[in-house]
Image (tube, rainbow, N blue to C red):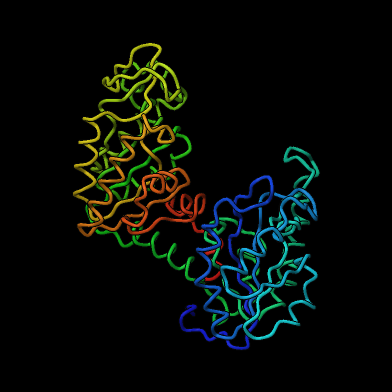
């Protein structure tokens, strides 16, 4: 497969799909430019080669065309500053032919939000899914999506996908467009390559022992990931709010802790499958419980299956920290998705911090560690430890679907 490193973009028009869906405040100022900075190596490589750069992205979930509050014009100056060249702007992504034709070598153009067009997502607007007209409208829109992608593909000589965060969506610019380029003229950007390699390391190129740490409030949202991991890991640590569904399923008392009462049988089934696969399934043995969901709540440490009425588990306890730490520091491959407690409140961040420290220690000793999923990334960043693990993924839903074992359309479209 062609890679960005071995391709010379000189004189070539390169269409690069990035993920510049960055958060903005009420005055349209960027509050976190991580995604923009992450794409810069790819964009700078093309400019340095003397390529003609066409940048495409979505922003938010616009409901009409145009939808001014989701315009990419608000980030134009910042993208220009980071890229080191003045980036031009096309205020309609589908009518940018003249702006593209005017590009000279080493110049860059940012297209307006591709999601202004419903064809990008291929989902009808203004029609509910239970409406009898929805399926027909979607079928018609899918056909229109191909024409949308074909028009945008005609802008460029080469297609580069550097938007891992949207790789799980078969959208016009994230997957369908790639069909209009041959294998020598479509490739991943640097960020996408890193993400693909990171997923491969923890799912297909595993060095054992392999420990996965899965947090979160609900078992139901992680079931497909858990079931896929049960065929790969040596240790599976389940923590966060889902702990208490397991504890109740085993006959414990959990007070006011989070629990999915309709998933108790599922919890027991997961435990059975772990045993059948010789997976060491680790759950909290003690918890930091509180009498209120508040940073000012009274707290105590109790057994995770003997929580008093009126109290709820908001973090793992000291015995659990030692239990989890022992598994983590002796691992050679580590995946962390989801904190161990309500880390946003410092009082209940102790367990998650201990987990992060253990992952860093294992990484220092040669383990490969991948951190992914929104809360895990926020967690590792809060503790200032992102530079002490192997890789922090930029993809939330995309990473989770990859861990589930699903084929991501944005990856398959380029890899073939």
Which residue lies at the image location 40% right of the left edge and 55% below the top edge? 392
Relative vertical location of residue 101 with respect to residue 148 in this rendering, above or below: below
- Taking depth in this image into account, of 149 and 138 the one nearest to the observer is 149
Q: Residue at x 51, y 84 (%)?
A: 7
* Of the pair 152 and 44, the residue shown nearer to us: 44
Question: Quarter-wise, where is residue 230 in the image?
Answer: top left
Q: How many marks?
A: 0
What is the x, y in percent for residue 325?
Answer: 22, 41
Residue 69 is at least partly visible in this image: yes
Q: Most extreme residue toward the bottom, as rendered?
A: 11
At 75% from the left and 66% from the top, the residue drawn is 93
The quarter of the displayed image where residue 304 is located: top left
Q: Is residue 13 left or right of residue 373?
A: right
Judge by depth and name the residue closer to the eye, 185 or 345: 345
Residue 283 image point, x, y percent: 29, 32
Question: What residue is drawn where x is 50% and y is 63%?
Answer: 38
Side of 74 relative to 35 (left or right): right
Q: Tell me: residue 197, above or below residue 404.
A: below
Work out whether residue 32 or residue 207 is closer to the camera in this orientation and state it: 32
Q: Is residue 70 left or right of residue 80?
A: right
């Amino acid at each position: 497969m062609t890679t960005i490193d071995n391709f010379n973009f000189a004189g070539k028009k390169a269409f690069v799909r990035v993920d510049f869906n960055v958060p903005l405040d009420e005055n349209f100022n960027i509050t976190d430019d991580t995604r923009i900075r992450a794409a810069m190596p790819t964009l700078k490589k093309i400019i340095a080669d003397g390529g003609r750069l066409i940048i495409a992205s979505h922003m938010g979930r616009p409901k009409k065309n145009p939808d001014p509050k989701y315009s990419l014009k608000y980030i134009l100056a910042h993208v220009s500053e980071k890229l080191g060249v003045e980036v031009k702007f096309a205020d309609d992504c589908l009518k940018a032919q003249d702006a593209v034709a005017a590009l000279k070598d080493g110049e860059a153009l940012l297209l307006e939000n591709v999601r202004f067009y419903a064809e990008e997502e291929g989902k009808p607007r203004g029609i509910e899914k239970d409406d009898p007209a929805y399926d027909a409208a979607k079928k018609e829109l899918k056909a229109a999506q191909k024409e949308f992608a074909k028009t945008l593909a005609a802008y460029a000589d080469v297609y580069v996908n550097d938007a891992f965060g949207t790789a799980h969506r078969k959208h016009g610019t994230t997957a369908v467009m790639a069909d209009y380029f041959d294998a020598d003229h479509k490739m991943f950007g640097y960020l996408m390559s890193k993400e693909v390699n990171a997923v491969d390391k923890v799912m297909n190129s595993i060095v054992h022992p392999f420990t996965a740490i899965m947090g979160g409030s609900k078992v139901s949202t992680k079931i497909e990931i858990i079931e896929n991991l049960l065929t790969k890991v040596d240790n599976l640590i389940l923590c966060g709010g889902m702990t208490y569904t397991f504890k109740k399923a085993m006959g414990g008392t959990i007070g006011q802790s989070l629990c999915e009462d309709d998933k108790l049988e599922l919890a027991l089934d997961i435990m059975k499958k772990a045993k059948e696969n010789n997976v060491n399934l680790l759950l909290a043995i003690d918890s930091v419980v509180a009498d209120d969901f508040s940073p000012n709540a009274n707290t105590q440490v109790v057994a995770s299956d003997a929580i008093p009425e009126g109290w709820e588990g908001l973090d793992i306890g000291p015995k659990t920290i030692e239990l989890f730490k022992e598994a983590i520091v002796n691992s050679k491959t580590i995946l962390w998705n989801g904190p161990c407690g309500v880390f946003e409140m410092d009082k209940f961040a102790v367990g998650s911090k201990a987990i992060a420290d253990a992952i860093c220690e294992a990484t220092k000793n040669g383990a490969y560690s991948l951190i992914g999923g929104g809360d895990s990334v926020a967690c590792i960043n809060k503790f200032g430890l992102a530079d002490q693990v192997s890789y922090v993924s930029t993809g939330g839903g995309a990473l989770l679907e990859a861990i589930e074992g699903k084929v991501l359309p944005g990856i398959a479209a380029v890899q073939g």
